[in-house]
Image (spheres, grey):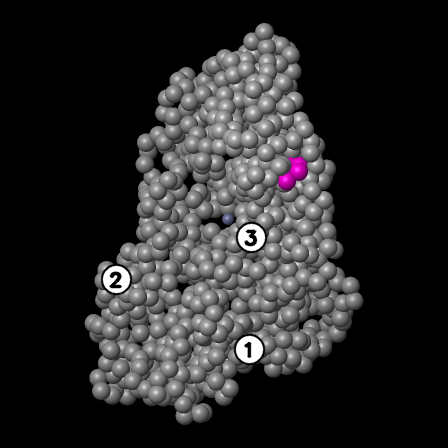
Amino acid sequence: MHDDTNLTVGRATRVLNERVSPAAYSSTVPLSVSAHALTGEPITPEEGLTLEFTPFEVDSAWGPAWGTTWFKLTGSVPAEWAGRRVEARVDLGFDTNMTGFQCEALVYRADGSPVKSINPRNQWIPIADAAEGDEPVELYLEAASNPVLLDYHPFLPTQEGDIETSSPEPLYRARRMELAVFEPEVFELSLDLEVLLGLQAELPASEPRRMHILQALDNALDRLDLQHIVETASEARAQLRDVLDSPADASSHRIAAIGHAHIDSAWLWPLRETIRKVARTASSMTELIDRDPDFLYGMSSAQQYEWIKQHRPEVYARVKDAVEHGRFLPLGGMWVESDTVMPTGESLARQFAYGQRFFEREFGVRSKGVWLPDSFGYSPALPQLMRRAGFEWFFTQKISWNQRNVFPHHSFLWEGIDGSRVFTHFPPMDTYSSELSGAEVAKSSRQFRENRVASRSIAPVGWGDGGGGTTREMTGKARRLANLEGSARVAWQHPDDFFDEARAELTDPAVWVGELYLELHRGTLTSQHATKAGNRRAEQALIEAELWAATAAVREGFAYPYDEIDRLWKLLLLHQFHDILPGTSIAWVHREAAAALAGVVSDAQAIAADARRTLVGEGNRELVFSPSSVAGPVPLGAAPAAASAPAVSLTERDGGFVLANEQVSIVVSREGLITSAIDAATGRDAIPQGMAANLLQLHQDFPNMWDAWDIDRFYRNRVDDLRGVESLSATVTDGVAHVTVERTFSQSSVRQTISLAPGAKTVVLRSEIDWHETEKLLKLAFPLDVHAANTEAETQFGFHARPTHVNTSWEAAKFETSMHRFVLVREPDFGVALVNDSVYGYDTTRDSTDAGVTTTVRLSLLRAPRFPDPETDHGTHVITTGLVVGADPQSATAAGIEMNAPATAVMGAREVQPVVSVTGDGIVISSVKLADDHSGDVIVRAYESLGRRASGRLDVGFRNGGVREVSLIEDDVDGARTGVDLSLTPFEVRTLRITR
Ligand SMILES: [Zn+2]
């Protein structure tokens, strides 16, 4: 027999696209259209429905960037359509490749109730399943003319990413607004053809199953009269019945499908647009839930539910109803899908606490797993935090984006820095926005790494990023793929049920230890410095607000401002979303983020100041509040300042300066570089002979794509060392020695102050940078005379080690890595740490000379990508870093905390005894607050910071009813330990409730 495979595939493809799909609608009549265009911020539906509408010609232009046009559509169903299924079809000027990245609309009835949304892949609006004929139609469209920022030539700089700079020209031309008769049988035929075409393409060339499908396709097309498709669709479908009814193989892979739209809480659109995106998608999903009894939809992020509740209560009512019926599934248990690399441990604890509390309050449910398909790498502290917050599973897929190494597992146990393990699944389909195409379904079963011992994976199904969600085409495909020979089996399933089954069948899962490093998007540790600095300040300001408010509540009956603290935390948590904190959103988002985070800082500081005033009363003694458990005369309390150490000596040498106290002696060269840093205790110089630290290095930084996200390895090949000095001067002020160096370079300048305080081991480097570069990366380099096997970088509640060598491709890929407040390199008896107040990225190199191995650590200060914000980071930044000479994990931890949590001096009458204090080397208190349940109980979180076993105790400084362990989110836990003993395992986090 001749091989007619290509002939049949070509025939079926053309007939499907050019004849069958268009024939899903038969008769049409135009709707009358009028419109009202708004250029500014959105209005409520009540306001929208009462606007003045003026006539609008279909085929005319509408919608400048970020505007809203309200369309009013009126008409009448023709009498002859009685009994037929009638829909409205609206094409606002859609590009079907840009769902979520383009214009879209929410459709309302005349009474203001939402119908569903329309977008490029979902252009229909239900009118009547069986029309009566002559019924009037009146619909309102709240259409958002969001500009396309990522198109066929991606990553080009654009001014459209901010309403303040975008063009006023209309962006879209409406093509179609009409009533139409929908032909269900033709629609079903189109899905039959699509599924069979997709399946046969994945089968081996001459396999019988493929041949049977091809023959059935030919037979079906032979029965189809292309001039009378409606009339002959059933006959054609009958020819496909056998191949569609043939059941799946016994060993076929099982796909747990979950309807989904990964809606970025901000990205190429501002927060205010996400509020509407979420409402649009949710309205379509509740409509689809009503239409398809098997379909399940999952949505994460309590914040997104709260937005719908506040801004589109009519949509929320339907969501709530669908949640109650188990069809709309709250997922993930977090406030937003946050970045997990940069937020502090306290922030991640609050992501879980605020997320779970919202789900519990609104729906009476908790999430059993953490759902983070899209953030950029995962901290090795997460397994413990997830487990201690009560989660049983973790889901992501982003590691499939790795540039070099293929992750070896899809279902496995992930082990964190403390040894906690969490069952984790990555979908082998490698996407969070599946269309259930034949290729995607086949990829799931082909790529699944656990095929020897397991049989199931997850597929999130629906348009993501900018929203859209699942379509009726996707649910139609799922029905056909439920039990189909040659395909994986697809069934809608709650992820909790998937994880139960996956764990049960995988009796001996592989274990992955340590961070889930994403070998991509390394620039997200540096882009948009103001957002990152604002995050760091806001995190600390909130911790201090809670600490002093709780202390004042216990000591003085201060009214703990629960609601205000909740409001501020939620604002901070929102801005930790995985395109905001990483610096990958449009200019508009980052402009608003800087303002919002500054607001969090000032409002939190106002709470702290109020509480401190209450604590010390009126008086004229200077009292110093120490907000950390590792510093100050009375940690977590207030006392008069300790007598200060002798002033630092400052001498001139060779055109530079020597700064010395009893701890360290620092040489600053005439170039303003640190050429020597001697630790008095050991006599060791931290700087290798002949080398210079505190060297600013400017690199060209133009990645191949994803500008704000990526640093590509070749950036290192071109570098300018910034050694030129405009001025160099030195002073001693209040015993502190300062050397000030000013440099200009390229389009920018920097004024740097190198300071050494009495008694300090840390040399503080404050850099005020006026930055106006294009596609550049600024590094601050520290060659260190330390033969270090690893760098040890702080993460949430501890630190983690990364080798300094690049023996394997896995290590080579980590050429830019993350830190929190410190990174340490050390030999067994001598180490050097770098601390910072707003830096998250660093790189390490290892050099070998005749004098031995040295280690260079370079902090990433600023970048200048041009997409999506064409002027990323232009302006002034103050970045403070510090060189800690003679450091170990304990002093590095303390130095990092001190730089970020400085003491505050207040005039008052009385000292303040801390409400809690801790004994035990390496045990750090991260939070003191009142309980979220408003009981007045005090919550204290402590962790072991050094990676070793610690014994200690918590001393409670007030009358109390006992101490017991609770979960990370303050739930009671089974078998809770009680009492004040604080024996901790390495990096263990313990949350304690002290009853009042
Ligand atoms: Zn995302």
Q: Secondary structure at mark 3?
A: loop
Which region of the structure is painted magenta?
481-486
> Is 485 covered by the magenta stretch?
yes
Residue 758 as seen in the image, left or right of residue 890: left
Residue 477, image x, y percentages: 61, 34
Residue 103, image x, y percentages: 44, 33
Residue 708, image x, y percentages: 39, 54
Q: Along the polypeptide, which appears first: circle 3 or circle 1?
A: 3
Q: How many marks?
A: 3
Residue at the image position 29 percent from the left and 61 percent from the top: 700
> Is 237 covered by the magenta stretch?
no
> Would you say the residues marked 3 and 1 are in contact, meaning their CB atoms lie under 8 Å apart?
no
- Which dot, 3 or 1, sits closer to the camera? 3
Q: Disc number at residue 126?
A: none
Residue at the image position 37 percent from the left and 60 percent from the top: 712
Q: Along the polypeptide, which appears first: circle 2 or circle 1?
A: 1
The amino acid type of the residue labelled 3 equals Gln
- Which dot, 3 or 2, sits closer to the camera? 3
Q: Along the polypeptide, which appears first: circle 3 or circle 2?
A: 3
Say which quadrant the N terminus sits in. top right
Relative to residue 233, is residue 862 depicted above or below?
below
Residue 488 as seen in the image, left or right of residue 592: right
Q: Disc number at residue 397?
A: 3
User: Which residue was labeled with disc 2?
Assistant: 748
Relative to residue 695, is residue 603 depicted above or below?
above
Residue situated furthest front in the rendering: 1
Task: Report whether residue 89 is seen.
Answer: no
